[in-house]
Image (cartoon, helix red, strand yellow):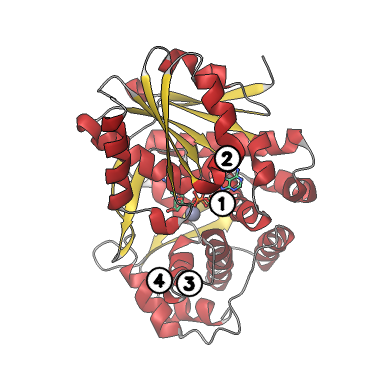
Amino acid sequence: MNNCRTVQVDLGDRSYPIYIGRNTAPELLFPLISGRKVLMVTDSNVEKYHAEKYLAAFRETADVTLFTYDAGEQSKHLGTVEKICRAAVAAGLDRSSVFIALGGGVCGDMTGLAASLYMRGTRYIQIPTTLLAMVDSSVGGKTGVDLPEGKNLVGAFFQPQAVLMDIENLRTLPVRELSNGLAEMVKTAVILDGALFEQLESAAESLLQLSETAPLAETIGRCCELKAEVVSNDEKENGLRAILNYGHTFGHALEAVTGYETFAHGEGVAIGMCMAADLAVAMGLFTAEEALRQETLLQKFQLPVRAEGLALVPDKLLQSMMHDKKTSGGKLKLILSDRIGHADIFKGIGMDMIAEALCSRI
Ligand SMILES: NC(=O)c1ccc[n+]([C@@H]2O[C@H](COP(=O)([O-])OP(=O)(O)OC[C@H]3O[C@@H](n4cnc5c(N)ncnc54)[C@H](O)[C@@H]3O)[C@@H](O)[C@H]2O)c1
Ligand SMILES: [Zn+2]
């Protein structure tokens, strides 16, 4: 067939494979969809570039209808989930049918939620087309949508049946979106795998240029493996899974106080990781050299490492951090790395220290 590696997500009877490769064959999914009704959900950008190839392949074996929503986070609400479900009714999907999400994290999150709700639960498959969706949102079974009050406030844990990744699909992705995914890869490496961090350092240029297949497939695969491992041990985020939020409490606050218009998610996370590293250095956990290595790698991936010139108010950021849904019992929980390749959950850090870490980067 073609070069493709498989990462297995181990969740008992909800285990599933992630196929990763270049020109990964859509036929790998045939056993899951043959003879069934399928609703393939995509967005208006991805439809232009990638829908045709998958439609043609899947129609060899299944009865496939396409549903397209307007690209962007602004579509990620319950209204679109209702439209997806109504399109499923119109196409005659029943409980044995399958949803396929062809797109980025917005597509996967919404399609997964629709599949979890439709007829009290059907099945879905993800074909992530952004780097962020490949290394992050398509692994782990978190689905959901936004409310006017905040992001991802409504959702469900619902695992897909399979995930199919073709790194060739990344060639049409704008570079800013690619950088977003690279931020999550740096995060994964810093908290879980020092060797992966070194690999990202040495292949940085070719990763950003998409110029070589091997390092891309290898590092994406490794990120999936690492996230899959964490999720297998803590599917519903009662403990360990929280370390995946490294840089995110700071990052979410930066995104929120700027009205989600200034920073893309990965950009907020990149600055957030630098703030977390500064804090860890101040606490004597992390060395200044390690913090600099992280910062340098983020810069190589064209990510921002400070939020200067925006006149951000530290108190507003702190308040926003306290409102992040990752607080528990009113106490701020922060993920800090104590060496590249390892992180832990820290509670009860003095607000003055956190404020200091914030202030040095805004
Ligand atoms: N479920 C999870 O565990 C999890 C984890 C992280 C993020 N998320 C969610 O993921 C979302 C962000 O994901 P995203 O950045 O992939 O968003 P997205 O789906 O909106 O995609 C980003 C942009 O890239 C475009 N695009 C996608 N694939 C393309 C391609 N191959 N070529 C050209 N353009 C393409 C899209 O049309 C969109 O404009 C957020 O809603 C976030 O909450 C979920
Ligand atoms: Zn993230």
Q: Tell me the quarter of the image containing the C terminus.
A: bottom right
Q: Residues within 10 Å of mark 1 (few under 14, many from 20)?
A: many
According to the picture, the residue beneath numbered tag 2 turns out to be 223
Disc 1 residue: CB within 8 Å of ligand 2: yes
Question: Answer yes or no: do the residues labelled 2 and 1 have beta carbons within 8 Å?
Answer: yes
Q: Amino acid at mark 3?
A: Leu
- Sequence-wise, the earlier of marks 3 and 1 is 1
Q: CA distance from mark 2 to mark 4?
A: 29 Å
According to the picture, the residue beneath numbered tag 4 turns out to be 349
Q: Tell me the quarter of the image containing the N terminus.
A: top right
Q: CA distance from mark 2 to mark 1?
A: 9 Å
Please state which of the two labelled residues, at mark 2 or mark 4, is closer to the viewer. Answer: 2
Q: CA distance from mark 4 to mark 1?
A: 24 Å
Quick check: 115 above or below 300? above
In terms of depth relative to the viewer, which is nearer, 291 or 302?
Answer: 302
Question: Answer yes or no: do the residues labelled 3 and 2 have beta carbons within 8 Å?
Answer: no
Residue 48: quarter of image? top right
Residue 254: numbered disc: 3
Q: Amino acid at mark 1?
A: Glu
Q: CA distance from mark 3 to mark 1?
A: 16 Å
Q: CA distance from mark 3 to mark 2?
A: 25 Å
Please state which of the two labelled residues, at mark 3 or mark 4, is closer to the viewer. Answer: 3
At 65% across and 35% down in the image, what residue appears?
A: 167
Residue 165, percent from left and from top = 57, 32
- Sequence-wise, the earlier of marks 2 and 4 is 2
- Residue 19 appears in view: no
At 68% across and 55% down in the image, what residue appears?
A: 175
